[in-house]
Amino acid sequence: MKFSDLELKPSLLKAIRRAGFEEATPIQAQTMPLILQGRDVIGQAQTGTGKTAAFGLPILQALPPRASKLQALIIEPTRELALQTREELFRLGRDEHAHVQVVYGGTPISRQIKALKHNPTVLVGTPGRILDHLQRRTVKLTDVQQVVLDEADEMLDMGFIQDIEKILSYVKQPHQTLLFSATMPQAVMKLGEKFMNHPDVIKIQAKHLTTDLIDQYFVRAKDYEKFEILCRLFDVQAPDLALVFVRTKKRVDELTHGLQARGYNAAGIHGDLSQSRREMVLKRFRQGKIDFLVATDVAARGLDISGVTHVYNFDMPQDPDSYVHRIGRTGRAGQNGISVTFVTPDEIGYLRTIEQLTKTKMQPLRLPSDRQALQGQLAASRKQIEDLLASDLSKYTQAANNLLDEYSAVDLVSALLKDLTKDPSTVKVTISPEKPLPYKPKRPHKHQRRDNHRRPRRNNRQRPHKQRGRRKHK
């Protein structure tokens, strides 16, 4: 389904194009028409499948012009998800001038109270802090038309069920309730039955990765080692068409410029590129005029490019489903593909989680030596020379003969090969360091509260156990 089929505002369609979305994901295609009709919806889909836009675009569509009161409330389980959702809504609603505010624990509530006085139209937050504001009357839900419970299974596992029920009790007027969750346990369904009006239930099956045609490898490397290793792999593996995934727009620019400086035919795409520039880069990549395309997950969403032989995860994907999405770009149409994932020492836990999801154990990749990399470059250079020899060289015959009078044929060919190959020592490239993903192997116990504002301060000392007898005073 195309987003243009949904009759969204022109400003939202413009933002969608700017974000690089080409067509709706399954969860978006099946839930958005229902949400736009005003129906309550329960949507089940894995993380990384576009759930934020699935509820975010209809919320932005429904915002009345020049609204001065809160219209929509989005409840997220963690501070990180709340910030991500706020950023996504800000990006999609920039042309709508949507006023989106985020509240979460762990920061001074006074700053949030001050910001809330500017009358946001959309509020995103964690359950405990939202409830705190409601009890202080710094947030009022009297005009809210839409309520979203995002990652509902996570919130229930983290013990937020009572907070959520209290929050929903503040919404007295008729409104639309949307619930999104990666899994659909009975507790989530009961929540829907209690607070929703005959919801439509949409379940998107998790994609199962077909690994038969994709050889999956991983490379252990510290962040500062990645670039040199990537260049060696390019030289030895000689991909016909390769996608390189990184985590941030800054990394796209730095890695692209570094590869170009080393002589690789590379280009990059990310969310800050204009639509025309993005389309031009993708067209050249499809035509094989660009060998290496560096991209973020968001920029690569919706891409359907045949002939990709290699996928390199320069940065570890943020969730297992993104990994499946990334490497699924290769191994298509019966052709074999190769994926290589760079893993820093602190990210091994993510690697194991991905292996569990895909039911495939990645193989460690032996790093190419400098000699092997040079041999790979020389093989590529020979191919370039052979292509040149097949062209018309008559204009250069006299100059060639003059050079042969002064130098040996071996010296001349050696000079040509040196020019065609890339000596790393002559072109220094520095990529800004990126922090490893924060891996938390264990989820909180379902009865354990995890809202940030309820945590004790780090400098608070625990009281010692009470002892019998009188306490000694200094």
Image (cartoon, grey):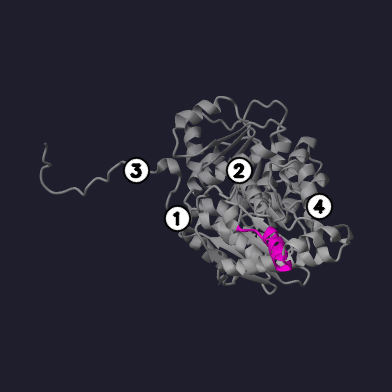
Which residue is the site of mark 1? 444
> Mark 4 highlights which residue?
283
- 332 on left or right of 452: right
Q: Amino acid at mark 4?
A: Lys
Secondary structure at badge 1 equals loop
Residue found at the far bottom of this picture: 212
Give the image location of residue 61, x and y in percent. Answer: 73, 37
Reading the image, the residue beneath label 3 is: 458
Check whether the beta carbons of the residues at disc 2 and disc 3 lie within 8 A of each other. Answer: no
Q: Are marks 4 and 2 in contact (CB under 8 Å)?
A: no
For the residue labelled by badge 4, is the local secondary structure a helix, a strand or a loop?
Answer: helix
Mark 1 vs mark 4: give the one in front: 4
Q: Earlier in the sequence, mark 1 or mark 3?
A: 1
Circle 2 residue? 85
In the rendered view, would you say 321 is above or below 279?
below
Q: Mark 2, residues whose alpha carbon is within 10 Å: few (<14), some, or many (≥20)?
A: many
For image coordinates 62% across by 31% down, the residue present is 70
Q: Looking at the image, tell me whether mark 2 or mark 3 is earlier in sequence order.
A: 2
The segment highlighted magenta reads: 408-423
> Label 1, label 4: how many angstroms apart (C-alpha)?
46 Å
Residue sitting at x 73%, y 54%? 25
